[in-house]
Amino acid sequence: MGSEFKYSEEANEKAKQDIQDYCLAYFDESVILADGFELGFLGCGYSYSGSYAIYNLGTCIEILMQRDGMSFDDAEEFIEYNVIGAFVGDRMPVFLVPMKELYEYQS
C-alpha cells in the first residue's frame, strides 16, 4: 500500500482506550469492534438498523503486515476470511476502502 503508517503496541493501546471512551460517550453498547485493529478505526456510522464501527481496510492490512510479519497477500486473505468473513453479529464492523486509496493502489 505504500503508506506512512507505523504500528506500535503503545499507540494501539492508547487508541483502544480512546475508542472505548468515544463509543461509550456517543454510541450504544451494541457497536461491535474489531479487536487488534484499533489503529485502523475511523469512527462510527449510522444506518436504519443502528450504529457500526468503521475501519480503514488498508490500515488494517498494514497492521497485520507490520505487527504479524505477513505479506500483503497473506494479510489481505487473513482479514477477508478471518475478520470480514467471520459473522459475529448483525452490527459487525464495516471495512472501508477509501476511493482515493483505491485509485492510488491501482496507479
Image: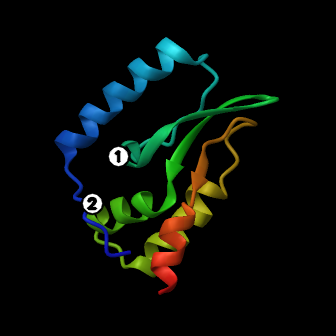
Q: Give how far apart the Cα atoms at labels 2 and 1 are.
A: 9 Å
Given the image, on which type of amino acid does mark 2 rest?
A: Phe
Task: Determine which quarter of the picture holds residue 84.
Answer: bottom right
On the rendered image, what quadrant is the N terminus found in? bottom left
**103 left or right of 9 in image:** right
Is 92 located above or below residue 23 in the figure?
A: below
Report x, y in % for residue 3.
31, 68
Q: How is the image coloured?
A: rainbow
As helix, strand or loop, the secondary structure at mark 1 comes to helix
**97 left or right of 47 in image:** left
Q: Which residue bears the numbered disc 2?
A: 5
Q: Which residue bears the numbered disc 1?
A: 39
- Please count the marks in the image: 2
Q: Are marks 2 and 1 in contact (CB under 8 Å)?
A: yes
Is 78 located above or below residue 60 in the figure?
A: below
Q: At 45% from the left edge and 63% from the top edge, which residue is drawn?
A: 58
